[in-house]
Amino acid sequence: MVLENYSDVVQKALKKAGATVGDRIRITGGGNFHEGLLMPRTELGDRDCIVLKLESGYNIGIRLVKGITVEKIAHAKLTQEEKFELGAEHVASQKFDSTKPAISLIATGGTIVSKVEYKTGGVVALESPTELLANIPELHTFCSIPEITVPFTKMSEDIVPGDWAKLATAVSKEVNKTNGVIITHGTDMLHYTAAAMSFMLKGLTKPVIITGSQRSSDRGSSDAFMNILCSARAALSDLAGVFVCMHGTPNDDYCLLIRGTKARKMHTSRRDAFRPINDTPIAKIWPNGKIEMINQDVGRRFDLGKCTADVRFEPKVAILKTYPGADPALLDWMVAKGYKGIVIEAGALGHVPTQSENSWIPSIKKAVKKGVAIVIASQCIYGRVNPNVYRNLRILFHEAGAIPAADMTAETAYVKLGCAIPRAKTLADIRTLLLTNVAGEINERLTDDQFLV
């Protein structure tokens, strides 16, 4: 590979050492030295800095100044992972053993199927999801993946409800052919998709595991490989339902299996960002196949019947957040724009501005009178909405006609509302559907062990 984007001074020093991108080099200066893989550099940044990948998997930049020397280390060989990161051709992946239990893999995009493009410094999609599997040889020892289905390729922030219909249709076909399904997905909106699959897949008798990664698959600190290994173990387990499988700790210890309607991303960048809300993890799963069940209130695999997909979803639903001084005209605007259902993220037990000059109660009453479903979820991460504790709550739920979301997260309530509206004829029907537990999204009571786990 050429040394494009490096300065003339750096290129001269590297050529003098006989080094090019992909070689192992030693950089010495000031009594210290660093050894690692010479990387291409991005179009941005200091062109006089040599980018070096250390044994730890992390990259550093060393500015070529007076007294710095560059030496090529002889007989260096690239590992498969290093070729992957450099964009070089992969070592041909082994074919899966068809006699081993089959798992379906559905790839939708996201960080887990991305890598750094060193030309720009940005993260881009892999040429094919098979690039990812080629770097997880352990999969070959206990399962087979006959093919990879790609219904769409998007970063999760770009996903729209119509994509859920495509995905649910693909899952319903694949899960009827193999032992289970793994869906790779971007993490930002992964919990929305997990809820959508939980409500759209009917008669599910096998595991559907949704996973992703916080770090791109070419990073030394990537969580992609372990997340997929643990997801494959879960896909072959005796569980049935939709689950999220992601790192349980910042280290490569184990993954947590979380109910699809109770998962939420709780940190922007930590590898253990996903946690169950108002629930305990279903299980801890280790890459070697060890599974430690934590929550026994979960479906179990059985072979009767086939999974189908009911992909009806009302796109004119929204989430609206209240805050001090929030103008109820925001709600009026949504109703005027034809929204058929709105989840309001309210305070604590479900409070909205009630007695103030900006009371939301008149606007909620008008919306309900027009047939718009108003669902109240809490801005608190944990706990449940309660219609009966305070007078203002009684006004909201018993007089204005709002529907409590129980202990559902606002995200799950939004997805469930979008699924409920096409299946209902009246607001009373929507209320009944919203308050009927379908996929573990509603608990009759909450316990202490469901908080901060």
Image: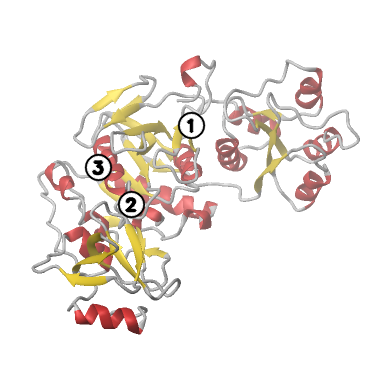
Percent position of residue 389, x then y? 73, 15
Tag 2's secondary structure? strand
Asked if labels 2 and 3 touch by Cβ distance under 8 angstroms, the answer is no
Please identify the quadrant where the C terminus is shown: top left
**At label 1, which amino acid type do we have?**
Lys
Which numbered tag is attached to residue 24? Answer: none
Spatial separation of the CA atoms under disc 3 and disc 2: 15 Å
Spatial separation of the CA atoms under disc 2 and disc 1: 22 Å
The residue that appears at 28% across and 34% down in the rendered structure is 253
Indicate left or right for 127 with 450 as reference: left
Indicate left or right for 434 with 279 as reference: right
**At label 2, which amino acid type do we have?**
Ile
Q: Residues within 10 Å of mark 3 (few under 14, many from 20)?
A: many
Tag 1's secondary structure? loop
The residue that appears at 24% across and 43% down in the rendered structure is 178
Pointer 3 residue: 229
How many marks do you count on the picture?
A: 3
Question: Which of disc 3 and disc 1 is earlier in sequence?
Answer: 3
Q: Residues within 10 Å of mark 1 (few under 14, many from 20)?
A: many
Percent position of residue 236, x then y? 23, 36
Residue 7 sits above or below residue 399 on the image = below
Question: Which label lies toward us, 3 or 2?
Answer: 3
Pointer 2 residue: 106
Image quadrant where residue 250 sits: top left
The residue that appears at 16% across and 60% down in the rendered structure is 79
Pointer 1 residue: 262
Residue 38 sits above or below residue 388 on the image = below
Asked if labels 3 and 1 touch by Cβ distance under 8 angstroms, the answer is no
The residue that appears at 31% across and 72% down in the rendered structure is 40
